[in-house]
């Protein structure tokens, strides 16, 4: 399995947002930059066979931007396992239910995504791993998805992805 971890784009500032944080959307700049980053993400390949998103609005908007850029796109699946309040091991368990040849795009939040990456790569949380907004990484997971069994193929910032798009 190949697992793309993609952090949502620039959202409205928490302090300025008057509504529920779960409904905090991307800014106009966030949508533009996320679209550019998504182009780079898709140019790198492999193309996702599954798109999973956190239930939070900013992640769903990010996932929808990626889907719009794909000529043939899988359905978007909203997953509580990508909620930033849920332990990373729940996402790992979810990944184990998918086919071993899947290419899974997981759109979510920090520090949840980097914590998941750290566990998959080393078996524990890794300080220093962090995905910037609209940044992504690609992990290769051979066989069953287990801690310390992943291989990092790449880890890119949003500006690097935009340059590739």
Image: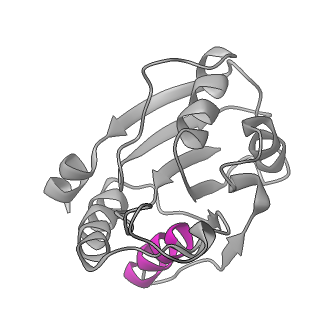
Q: Nearer the viewer, residue 136 or 150?
A: 136
Residue 7 lies, with reference to residue 90, above or below; the image says below
Magenta-colored stretch includes residue 136 = no
* Residue 147 screen position, x and y as percent: 73, 23
Q: Position of residue 6 (x, y in %)?
A: 47, 53
Total label count?
Answer: 0
Residue placed at 68% from the left, 50% from the top? Answer: 101
Quadrant of the rendered image containing residue 150: top right
The one nearer the camera, 27 or 141, is 27
Q: Is residue 2 above or below residue 66?
A: above
Q: Position of residue 40 (x, y in %)?
A: 27, 59
The boundaries of the magenta stretch are 58-69
Q: Residue at 54% x, 25% y: name it.
A: 151
User: In the rendering, at what x and y percent does residue 95 appear?
Assistant: 76, 47
Q: Residue at x 55, y 77 (%)?
A: 19
Viewer-nearest residue: 59 or 97: 59
In this image, 160 relative to 52: left or right? Answer: left
Which image quarter holds the N terminus?
A: top right
| SS assignment for the magenta stretch, majority | helix
- 64 inside magenta stretch: yes
> Does 155 sit above or below residue 19?
above
Looking at this view, is 5 or 130 the one in front?
A: 130
């Amino acid at each position: 399995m190949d697992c793309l971890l993609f952090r949502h784009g620039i959202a409205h500032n928490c302090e300025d947002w008057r509504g529920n944080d779960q409904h905090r959307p991307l800014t106009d700049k966030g949508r533009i930059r996320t679209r550019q980053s998504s182009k780079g993400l898709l140019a790198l390949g492999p193309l996702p066979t599954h798109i999973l998103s956190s239930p939070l609005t900013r992640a769903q908007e990010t996932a929808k931007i990626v889907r719009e850029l794909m000529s043939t796109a899988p359905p978007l699946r909203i997953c509580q396992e990508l909620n930033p309040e849920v332990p990373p091991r729940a996402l790992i368990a979810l990944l184990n239910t998918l086919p071993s040849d899947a290419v899974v795009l997981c759109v979510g939040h920090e520090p949840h995504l980097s914590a998941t990456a750290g566990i998959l790569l080393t078996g524990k949380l890794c300080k220093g791993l962090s995905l910037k907004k609209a940044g992504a990484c690609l992990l290769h997971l051979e066989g069953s998805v287990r801690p310390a069994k992943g291989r990092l193929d790449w880890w890119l910032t949003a500006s690097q992805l935009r340059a590739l798009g």
